[in-house]
Amino acid sequence: MLFLVLALVQPVCAGLYTDSCGMVWTDTCIPFEQDNETAYNEELMASFAPIMDNLTEVPDFGNHSWSDAFRETCAYMEERYAFTEWRGVDWNALYAMYAPRIADAEKDRDSAAYYRTLREFAYAIPDGHVMVLSPDDFGAKYADIGGGYGFSVARLDAGGVIVTYVAEGSDAQKAGIRFGDDVVSWNGRRIGDAINTTSIIWSPVKPSTGEGTLLQKQRFLTRAPVGAAATIGIAAPGDSVPRTVNLTAADDGYDTLVRTSIFLGREANDVEAGTMGNLKVIISNDTATCRTLPGGVAYIAVYEEAYDVYQPFKAAVKDAIARDAPGIVIDLRFNRGGDDNLAAAYAGWFVDRPVFYEYGTSYDPGTGEPAVLWESWAAPRPDRYTGPVALLVSPYTISSGEGLPKIFAESGTGAIVSWYGTNGAFGMESLGPTLPLGVMTAFPAGASLDENGEIQVDSNASMVGGVAPTVRVPLDAETLARAMAGEDVQLAYAVDWIEAQAENTTAVPSQKAAPGWMMPLVAVAGLAVWLGRR
C-alpha cells in the first residue's frame, strides 16, 4: 500500500496540500524566504491532516509502578517504532532481559539502578533517536564512569590502538605512559576485545552506526568507578615486549572525555553536559556562526535546523558570493537536527538541479500503519554559490543535520570531510511515554523514505548507515598528534580540498545574478505533535 501511494505522488508546487501525500514542497527554500514562521507552522500542521483525527495523547505512566510503566512503555514502542524490522529489534527479548532488573531496582528503591537499566535498554537499540532522558541521573553516571586512568586511546586506521593523551601529573604519566605507545591488553584481555565490551550508556549522543559505537567505546574504555583497578599492557614504539602497568581510576572531572572530543574540532565536556541541548550551550550560544578563514574561505557552522537559522545562513552564503570566496566550509560536526525542510533549503544554495529529499512518514494509530505525510525537494537558488563547498561531519551530526550531507552525497555536490560518518539516525522523532521519577522517553514513530519508498540514512541491523565522508581524514599518529596539540585537523583537510579544486580546475566565478534534542511542539486539540523531524 505504501509503495503504491509513493508511486502515484508526483511533485507539485511548494507548500501545496494533497490528499494523497499531505504537504508537498517542491522548493523548500520558499517558506524560509518568505520569513513568516507562523504561516510555515500552519503548513507543517497541515501535513498531519491525514492522521490528525487518529492521534492520541502521549501516555504518562509516572504514577505507575516502575515495572508496570516499563512493560507499558515497551508495548507502546513496539506498536509504533518505525524501524523494528529494519534494525532487527526483538522487543520480547529486550523486555525479558531488562524487566527483572527494573523489578529488582523497584524492590530495593534503587533509583540509580532503575535509571541505569533504562539507559541500557535504550542503548541496546542502535538508534540515536531512541532515548531516555532525566533531569537527574541519581548518581549513576558518576558511580559508573567518574574515575579516569589518566590517559586516553584511539584505534588507528591500520588497526593498532595507541595512547593519544596522558594527563599531566597523573599516575599514568608517572608510570611512563607516553603519546604513541601501543596498548595491547586491558585487564588480561586483548585490547580489541576489551574495547568491544565497553559500555557506552553515558555517551550523550547515542551512536547508531558501528564506527560511531567504536569511537565511543574507545573513549569510555579508560573510564571506571573511582578506585577501580586496571592492568594494562603497554609497549613503547620499537619495544618488542610489552610491559604491564597497574593503575587506579581517580576523579579527574571527566578529563579524558574532554580531551577525546577532538572529532568535534574542539574540546567539550560532552558527557558532563548530559544532553544535546546542554552541550550546545557549551559549543555556542548561537544557532549558526560564520567567519572568514585565511585565504578567504568562508566558514559557516550550523548547530541546528531551526526556522531562524535560515536568514543568517543565507546572509553568510551571499557574503561569500559577493566577495568571490574561493570556497565554503560548512561545519555540521555538532548539529543536533531540527526541521528537515530547512536542511533541504540549505542545499538549494549549492545544488545545480532539483534533488529529491524525502517522503516523510508517521505512524497512524487509526490504521496501525505508517502514513506518508509530506514530500520535499531541494531546488537550486537562481543566485546560488557555485564554488567548492566542503561539509564537516561527525557522529554527532544527527537527524536533519544529516540532510545536507545526504543531498551532497546523492547529487555529487562538493565534499564531505571527516574522520567519521554521520550518526545514522534520520527518523521522525516523537515523544514517548513519561516514566516514574520524571524519566522521559523519545523514539522515531516515522521514517524518511527515498524516491523508491525505501528507508534512507538510518542505520540497519548491521549498524551500517549515516552518510560517509567522501574525503576521509586519516586516523594515524600524525593526525592525532596534531589534533591533540589543538589543531582542527578535519578543518585543515577541508581547506586543503577546496584549494585543490582551484588548482585542478579553471576558476569559475560565483553566480551573482538571475527549526535538545527536542524541536518546538504545537498543541493541537490537546495533542503534542512534532513539527518536522527532530
Image (cartoon, grey):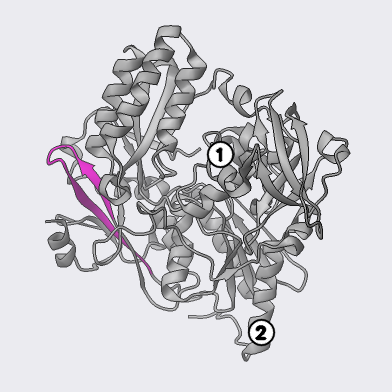
Q: What's the amino acid at mark 2?
A: Ala
* In the displayed structure image, the side of residue 78 where residue 513 appears, left or right: right
In the rendered image, the residue lying farthest to the bottom is 506
The quarter in which the N terminus is drawn is: bottom left
Residue 284 sits above or below residue 394 on the image: above
Per the rendered image, the range of residues in magenta is 360-378
Q: Secondary structure at mark 2?
A: helix
**Sequence order check, earlier mark of 1 and 2:** 1
Dividing the picture into quarters, in which one does residue 280 lie?
A: top right
Q: What's the amino acid at mark 1?
A: Thr
Q: Which mark is residue 502?
A: 2
Residue at image position (49%, 70%) is: 349
The quarter in which the C terminus is drawn is: top left
At which x and y percent is residue 291?
70, 61
At which x and y percent is residue 484?
77, 53
At which x and y percent is residue 213?
52, 47
Look at mark 1 in the image and give the residue it sits on: 198
Residue placed most toward the observer, 92 or 59: 92
Q: CA distance from mark 1 to mark 2?
A: 45 Å
Residue 132 sits above or below residue 16 on the image: above
At which x and y percent is residue 105?
43, 14
